Structure formats: structure tokens, C-alpha cells
Image: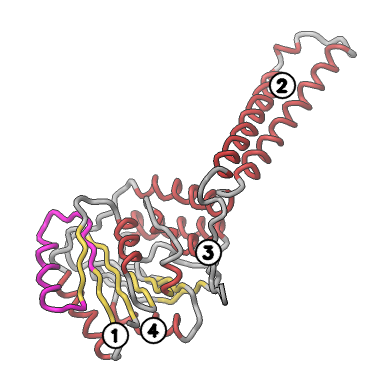
Amino acid sequence: MQISVVIPLFNEEESIVELTTWIKKVLHLHNLSYELILIDDGSTDSSWTIIQKLCTEDTDVKGIKFQRNYGKAAGLQKGFEVVQGDVIITMDADLQDSPEEIPELYNMITEGGYDLVSGWKKKRHDPILTKNIPSKFYNLTVRCMSGIKLHDFNCGLKAYKNKVVKNIEVYGDMHRYIPVLARWAGFKKIGEKVVHHQERKYGKTKFGIERFIRGPLDLLSVIFISKFSKRPMHLFGSIGLVSFSIGFIILIYLSYAKIIEEQYNMTQRPLFFLGVICFIFGTQLFLTGFLAELISRSSSERNTYNCDETINI
């Protein structure tokens, strides 16, 4: 099987039939073998009834239904667990991602040698203040913190090699940072393709203001996990040592001033409180790193690594 198309959806009853028809038309036109996996993330409308009908009519269409709404990341992860295609295509169900992009994304993986290709909605049809400007700021921040030169991390239209999706785990709201997770798993050839962004045809966006809070927190989580999950002492210990050293130097200076230079009222000076705070803060961070290191080393996954290939093992 050449392509697996994974589409998580929530209350998209108006667009499902139109989207699946469009995808099948494109893939048939290019003679690509495929499976189309629709993941109903606890929809409260008739989405699942429509999916059941589509699965009955076409065995290449497969459906998964969640008991309740778990979020986009959970839908993608479940799809990644069951896919069989050589190349995995993910896209949103709201018809804002064009299936016409699929063949070229497939070629970039199979012929271009990319591990992951992310869509770039260079020209967006979204509200400027609530989506365009925050999106640009978000992408700039992720580029700076991750070192991955992509313009649109959150684009739902992406293509992956099969082994990429089998070696990453998407949870929480980490669907925004799949390229970062892939880089952490050792897949370094990550590219992007300018894709057409269509105006929303039905319904309304499922993401509210909370994404502005969850996004930065998830970014900090994924950066920490990718760099320090197996060596937490390197982070907490380094910051703790710097803070401890600053506090220690300040307190030594104040002690010298009181004993040798006979200056008084040392405990009334703001510098004294700064020294005490840095000293205590540094000690706590160092102990936090030490405890995190003990937990990490006792974890069953402490020596779990992704192997690309083996011979005669």
C-alpha cells in the first residue's frame, strides 16, 4: 500500500462525504493504492453514521470512533498505530486542506528522500488578529527554540515516512510539534511545501482561545522532553549551581563586610535577601535535578532507542 490518509475529525458531518470523494478522485487519477482512515473524535452530530456508510460502500475507507472527545493529538496517534501505507498523509476534515497536494507530498517523501514534509499555508484565509498574527508569532518562537526551519508547524497537511509515525508518540496537544518530536526521534530530513489554503466551507473552527495558553506550555514541555528527558540533572543542576553560586558569593561578601570592615545592619540590606533567595533557590533546583535523575535512571525506558536498521541480529 502506497498511501495512508489519516483524518481526525470532530462534528464535520457537512464535509466528510465531499472530502472523501475528492481524496479518492485524486488518488485514483494518479494510480496510487491507499487506505483512508477517518477518526471520529467523539462527534455529537451524525459524523459517525456517515463514516459507517462510507466504510460499507468502500473497503478502502476505514473508521475509528472514540467514546468521547480526546483531542486531535489522540486521533492522530490512533491513526498512526494502525496505518499500513509506505507514506502517511495527515489532513484536516474541514476542507481547508486540498487533496490535490497529496501526490506531490508523496513524491517528496519517496523520491526526494524526506522523512517528513510539512505544509506551509503561505497565503492564509483566516482572521488576521485572531489567527494570522498569532500564528506567525508562534511559528517564529518554535523555529527559534527548536532550530527547525519551518514556516508553519501547525499545518494539518503533512506527509511522513511510515517509520516516522511508528517511532513517535503524540499526546496532549503535541500535534503542533510533530516535526520537533520527529527530529528528537532521529529523523533529520524535514522539509516543507507551500500548499493552498482554502476558506472554511462549513461550520466553524474547533480551536478556541485556550490554544494560546496550551501552545506555549506544550512547547516548553516538548523542548524539555526532547533535550533533557534522559538527563534532567543537566538542566536543573546547571541552573541550580549558578543560582547557588551567586547566593554563596553574595553571602560571603556580606560576611566579609560585617566581620572585617565592621559594617552593621547587613540583614537590613536588599542584597542580603537576594543572596538568601539565590542560595535557597539554587539548592532546591539542584535537589530537584538529583531526584529527577534518580527517577529517570529507574525508568523502564531509560535505555530505549529507535533503531533504523539491523543486520544479522
Quadrant of the drawing holding the N terminus: bottom left
Task: Classify mark 4: residues with Cα within 10 Å, few (<14), some (14-19) or many (20+).
Answer: few
Mark 2, residue position: 271
- Give the mark toward the camera: 4 or 1: 1
| 101 left or right, relative to 109 | left
Mark 4, residue position: 104
Q: Spatial distance from mark 4 to mark 3, Cα to Cα?
A: 28 Å
| Residue 138 coordinates in the image, percent (x, y) | 45, 56
State the mark number for residue 33: 1
Q: Earlier in the sequence, mark 2 or mark 4?
A: 4
- Give the mark toward the camera: 4 or 3: 3
Q: Spatial distance from mark 2 to mark 3, Cα to Cα?
A: 50 Å
| Residue 160 coordinates in the image, percent (x, y) | 42, 73
Report the residue that reaches farthest toward the right: 260
Q: Spatial distance from mark 1 to mark 2, Cα to Cα?
A: 70 Å
Q: Do the residues bearing badges 2 and 3 touch, measured as CB atoms within 8 Å?
A: no
Q: Which residues are magenta?
A: 38-60
Q: Is residue 163 visible?
A: yes
SS at circle 3: loop
- Give the mark toward the camera: 1 or 2: 1
Q: Do the residues bearing badges 4 and 1 touch, measured as CB atoms within 8 Å?
A: no
Q: Above or below — where is 111 with respect to 218?
A: below
